[in-house]
């Protein structure tokens, strides 16, 4: 997916309402998961990403700093993010428990 024309989100848009459910694309441009929920606010918060699984079943929740994700909107206005993490790296992280 070419992200060059996608509009980056501003710091004021980094809220749970905007970010939850966003698709995350990894370093290899493959989908690595979706944001389940957000802890904290802005770049100081963390995003809990459901990684792996199929249709949400068997996914492993892992927490990463929001600052490790670059959020943007595509041509349709859908929010997604890219990260330097790969799916394998995320799956090796400790499982997040609320």
Image (cartoon, rainbow, N blue to C red):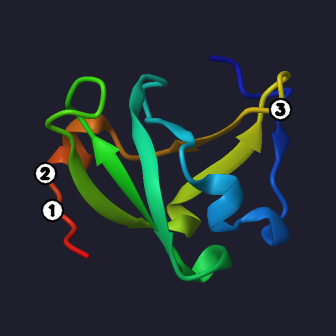
| Secondary structure type for disc 3 | loop
* Residue occupying the point 15% across, 62% down: 95
Dot 3 and dot 1 residues touching (CB under 8 Å) = no
**Which residue lies under the disc numbered 3?**
77
Q: Nearer the viewer, mark 3 or mark 2?
A: 3
Q: Toward which corner of the image does residue 52 lie, by quadrant? A: top left
Residue 27, located in which quarter of the rendered image?
top left
Q: Which secondary structure, mark 2?
A: loop
> Residue reaching furthest top?
1
| Residue 63 x, y percent position in the rendering | 33, 65
Q: Of the numbered discs in the image, which one, if any, rests on residue 92?
A: 2
Q: Residue at x 21, y 40 (%)?
A: 59
Q: Determine whether label 1 and label 2 are within 8 Å by CB.
A: no
Residue lying at 14% horizontally and 37% vertically, measured from the top left? 58
* Residue at mark 3 to residue at mark 1: CA–CA distance: 31 Å
Quadrant, the N terminus: top right
Q: Which mark is residue 95?
A: 1
**Label 3 Cα neighbours within 10 Å, binned few <14 / some 14-19 / many ≥20:** few
Q: Which percent across, then down, holds residue 67?
A: 57, 67
Q: Nearer the viewer, residue 29 or 22?
A: 22
Taking 44 as reference, is 81 above or below it? above
Q: Nearer the viewer, residue 18 or 10?
A: 18
- 53 with respect to 8 (left or right): left
Residue 25, disc: none
């Amino acid at each position: 997916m070419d992200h060059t024309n996608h509009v980056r989100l501003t710091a004021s848009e980094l809220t749970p309402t905007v970010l939850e459910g966003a698709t995350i694309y990894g370093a290899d441009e493959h989908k690595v998961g979706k944001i389940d929920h957000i802890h904290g606010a802005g770049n100081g918060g963390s995003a809990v990403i459901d990684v792996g699984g199929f249709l949400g079943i068997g996914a492993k929740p892992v927490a990463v700093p929001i600052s490790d994700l670059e959020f943007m909107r595509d041509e349709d206005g859908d929010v997604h993010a890219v990260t330097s993490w790969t799916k394998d790296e995320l799956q090796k992280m400790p499982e997040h428990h609320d």
